[in-house]
């Protein structure tokens, strides 16, 4: 449904995106019905005439599912579903189901299930005998508790259980992040299906999932930039954003998005071949601000440029982009030359954060030698009566940590 506050172009983009969401869910779109109104119908979301038109289309196409562009209230969904006699899914429900199917890690599964249960709870409705009051007392299901009330209580209990599990998993993830805190970290962020995972694979040589579908990646993956640089640079892939992303999902995936929040640099990936790239850029910018990452330095990457029409169209779009964002990078994640250029740009960016200094490692602490070579660029080494002095290029935090480890080892030595 298009409201007056929505431009025709934005509405068309949003409707096309809904079609891609439905396709990702495995649905075949056989028709589209659009209604322009000043406001949603309070009871049925659509007007009575449009409901009749939709019923005729459903019968003609032998369709059994209706996907709505906006989120509807439980009562609107129930009334409209009854009037059409089909399965009804609104935009939020589609996104939640896609997240549910694509979640792989324990954390992602718990995060998605919490939001799905919270979404389902107000939509439960009693059917037939299931709405009868259940007897209380010994062996009963609660004092006068209805079947629907029992289901809601089970949902509350399950949400509490999952929240506790997620808290424990978040603590473990925070411990892992703390070990990487003094390393240079880059996070790939952007709209869903912008090509983040393809860039991740190209820049790190990892085997992360790459698929031409929405929300293919829900779990954060952290890998070393390859070929390896000095200082080392860690690259993380994060969950993609989308317009009207349910607020609960943003909140529940905060632990996953903390990789972006704690990054030294954000690579904001934009699908330049999508005509709605400006809207998508704005959505990502708003979500980053919502999670508190709006202040982190950001490099715009306009990806999939090989899909932008002919050479003339590519040149025109490149000129427009660079006029507005002179520091932006225009590339295709499938181009080896473009990936080498981006790799060099990242290496140069972080080279400015390193300093040249000495690290003294006592002779009885030589097991730390491997850490020095792994985390620093060693320029030379010399010896004194108590140990080895390495001349290195590294970040101040790395040098301080290696010095601290060496001092702690000396203190524990017999």
Image (cartoon, rainbow, N blue to C red):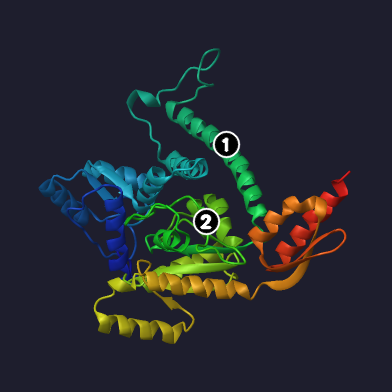
Residue in view at x 76 percent, y 53 percent: 366
Q: Which mark is residue 149?
A: none
Image position, residue 413 (x, y; %): 86, 46
Near-viewer residue (209 or 161): 209
Direction left: furthest residue: 60
Q: Residues within 10 Å of mark 1 (few under 14, many from 20)?
A: few
Secondary structure at numbered mark 1: helix
Q: Residues within 10 Å of mark 2 (few under 14, many from 20)?
A: some
Q: Please, is residue 145 above or below residue 9 in the view?
A: above
Nearer the viewer's eye, disc 1 or disc 2?
A: 2
Secondary structure at numbered mark 2: strand
Image position, residue 336 (x, y; %): 38, 69
Q: Between marks 1 and 2, how big is the CA–CA gap?
A: 33 Å
Image position, residue 148 (x, y; %): 43, 30
Is 67 left or right of 171, judged from the image as shown? left
Quadrant assignment, res 205: bottom left
Quadrant assignment, res 280: bottom left
Is 332 left or right of 229, judged from the image as shown? left
Residue assigned mark 2: 223
Q: Please, is residue 5 above or below residue 164 in the view?
A: below
Image position, residue 289 (x, y; %): 55, 66
Residue assigned mark 1: 160
User: Considering the image in quadrants, where does the N terminus appear?
Assistant: bottom left
């Amino acid at each position: 449904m298009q409201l007056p506050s929505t431009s025709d172009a934005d509405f068309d983009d949003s409707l096309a995106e809904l079609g891609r969401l439905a396709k990702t869910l495995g649905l075949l779109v056989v028709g589209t019905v659009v209604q322009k109104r000043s406001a949603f119908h309070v009871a049925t979301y659509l007007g009575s005439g449009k409901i009749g038109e939709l019923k005729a289309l459903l019968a003609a196409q032998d369709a059994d599912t209706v996907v709505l562009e906006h989120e509807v209230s439980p009562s609107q969904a129930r009334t409209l579903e009854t009037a059409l006699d089909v399965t009804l899914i609104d935009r939020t429900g589609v996104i939640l189901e896609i997240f549910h199917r694509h979640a792989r890690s324990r954390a992602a599964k718990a995060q998605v299930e919490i939001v799905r249960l919270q979404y389902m709870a107000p939509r439960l409705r009693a059917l037939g005998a299931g709405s009868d009051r259940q007897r209380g007392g010994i062996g009963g299901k609660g004092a006068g508790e209805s079947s629907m009330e029992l289901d809601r209580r089970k949902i509350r209990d399950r949400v509490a259980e999952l929240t506790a599990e997620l808290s424990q998993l978040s603590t473990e993830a925070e411990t892992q992040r703390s070990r990487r805190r003094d390393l240079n970290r880059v996070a790939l962020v952007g709209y869903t299906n912008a090509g983040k995972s393809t860039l991740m694979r190209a820049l790190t040589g990892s085997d992360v999932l790459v698929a031409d579908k929405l929300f293919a990646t829900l779990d954060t993956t952290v890998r070393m930039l390859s070929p390896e640089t000095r200082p080392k640079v860690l690259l993380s892939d994060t969950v993609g954003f989308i317009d009207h992303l349910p607020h609960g999902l943003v909140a529940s995936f905060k632990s996953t998005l903390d990789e972006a929040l704690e990054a030294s640099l954000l690579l904001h990936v934009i699908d330049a071949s999508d005509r709605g790239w400006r809207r998508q850029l704005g959505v990502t910018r708003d979500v980053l601000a919502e999670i508190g990452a709006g202040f982190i330095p950001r490099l715009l990457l306009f990806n999939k440029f090989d899909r932008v029409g002919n050479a003339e169209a590519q040149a025109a779009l490149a000129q427009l982009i660079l006029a507005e964002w002179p520091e932006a990078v225009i590339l295709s994640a499938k181009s080896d030359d473009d990936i080498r250029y981006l790799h060099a740009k990242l290496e140069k960016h972080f080279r400015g954060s390193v300093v040249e200094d000495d690290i003294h490692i006592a002779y009885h602490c030589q097991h730390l030698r491997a850490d020095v070579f792994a985390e620093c660029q060693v320029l030379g080494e010399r010896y004194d009566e108590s140990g080895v002095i390495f001349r290195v290029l590294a970040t101040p935090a790395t040098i301080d940590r290696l010095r601290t480890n060496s001092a702690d080892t000396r203190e524990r030595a017999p």
